[in-house]
Amino acid sequence: MLNYLEGYSQPKSRSHKQLFRITVALLCLFFLLFSGCTQIGPRTISVGRAYYNEAINDTEDEQMLLSIVKGRYGETFSLLAVRGVTANVRVNTNVGVQAGFGPGENYAGNLVPFSGVLAYEENPTITYSPVQSEQYLRQLMSPIPLDILLSLVRSGTYSKTYLNLIVNRINGMRNPDFLDVQPDQRFQRFIELNFELTRAGKLEWVADSKKETGYAVWISDYAPTYTEKVREYLDLLEISMPEDESKDLVLPIYFAVSGRGGSGLAISTRSTFDLIQILRAAVEIPQEHANSGVAISYPAMSPVGNNIRIYASKDEPKGASVAVKHRDYWFYIKQTDTDTKLFYLTLRVMWDVCLAADADQKAEPILTIPVSR
């Protein structure tokens, strides 16, 4: 290219000067457009992927909250799951040059020496599928599996919260959804002791392939500092303290209502639908709706739902984590309400598991919507 331009390094006439300028401009524009096109693909992924993911996540949150609120009003609702997003990208380029001939005063100031347009167009196609399979319903109503409970409890920081949310009975200690069944105060004490021993590094929930159940609570290196707490922990489970207090304890975990010979933890869990019912009961009902009787009444909340709440407001809320409008009111979760947000996050994870089970039953998408200009 340098050799090519050298021939125009000293144009000797006005027409040669114009041709030189146009040639340089076209070459610069060509390389500019070409380099821009090579960057469109990576930029589309780095920018578009985040936007699509954020939009899908936000609408999933809103869809779930709306279904919770409508359920509180005894209204039917349906779910649409996003099964795929296909984005078609098209790039158009347009180059123009204006040149004048003859006396310069005839066209001075009226010409655009060169122009270029790079047009970027993206046409996404969103694929939805109604959630309605038998497998989805079974997953929704079934108790949450022990392996999921184990994964959540092992997180440590929120082990108390996850045990309280998911477990409704351990060795006869009851943790009911509502106060129509009397809760057992020993259950809350068990959760506290479990958290203290876990934080001290003396207790851990583990997967144990050598045991019949595959899961166990392992208590080790607890004497003498934590001997009394371990003793109380075992007493709550109605398990005898070993004579040798230096011995590690391995307590198998069973998915059952009662233990097997008093040797381990018999655990029963809530279903995802149970968590939905608890969150529905936490929906604040506006006074005019309460007076008219359009909302379903729930029993008083047990300790599991004491600190969760979905607020209602006539005006659109500011600083909401997620908000939806229904019956002329806004229902929302406050950004500062960590208890409700953690409950909502846990439910969202469980509900996504159920949706995944539904997706496994789908041979092909049901509804595909192209989004065009």
Image (tube, grey):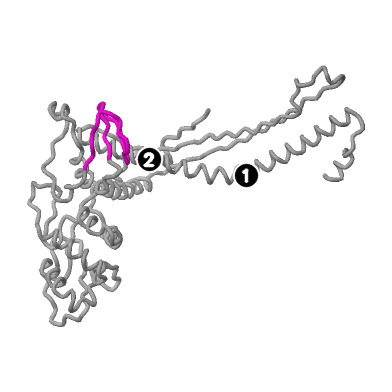
Q: Is residue 12 left or right of residue 299?
A: right
> In terms of secondary structure, where does tag 2 sit?
helix
Q: Is residue 49 left or right of residue 328?
A: right
**In terms of image quadrants, where is residue 120?**
top right
Residue 346 location (% of width, % of height): 28, 50
Q: Is residue 317 left or right of residue 100?
A: left
Could you tell me which residue is drawn at 27 percent across and 60 percent down?
Answer: 153
| Towards the viewer: 14 or 53 | 14
The circle on residue 39 is 1
Q: Which residues are magenta?
A: 309-333
| Towards the viewer: 14 or 154 | 14
Q: Amino acid at mark 1?
A: Gln
Asked whether residue 108 appears in the rendered view, the answer is yes
Residue 184 location (% of width, % of height): 9, 57
Residue lying at the far right of the rendered structure:
12
**In terms of image quadrants, where is residue 192?**
bottom left
Residue 312 location (% of width, % of height): 23, 34
Q: Considering only order in the chain, which callout, 2 or 1, is on the residue closer to the N terminus?
A: 1
Q: CA distance from mark 1 to mark 2?
A: 29 Å
The relative height of residue 268 versus residue 330 in the rendered view (above or below) is below
Magenta span: helix, strand or loop, mainly?
Answer: strand
Could you tell me which residue is drawn at 17 percent across and 50 percent down?
Answer: 304
The relative height of residue 123 versus residue 349 in the rendered view (above or below) is above
Image quadrant for the N terminus? top right
Q: Label 1: few (<14), some or many (≥20) within 10 Å?
A: few
Q: Which residue is mark 2?
A: 58
Asked whether residue 138 appears in the rendered view, the answer is no
Q: Amino acid at mark 2?
A: Asp
The magenta stretch spans residue 123? no
Q: Label 2: few (<14), some or many (≥20) within 10 Å?
A: some
The magenta stretch spans residue 328? yes
Residue 107 location (% of width, % of height): 80, 19
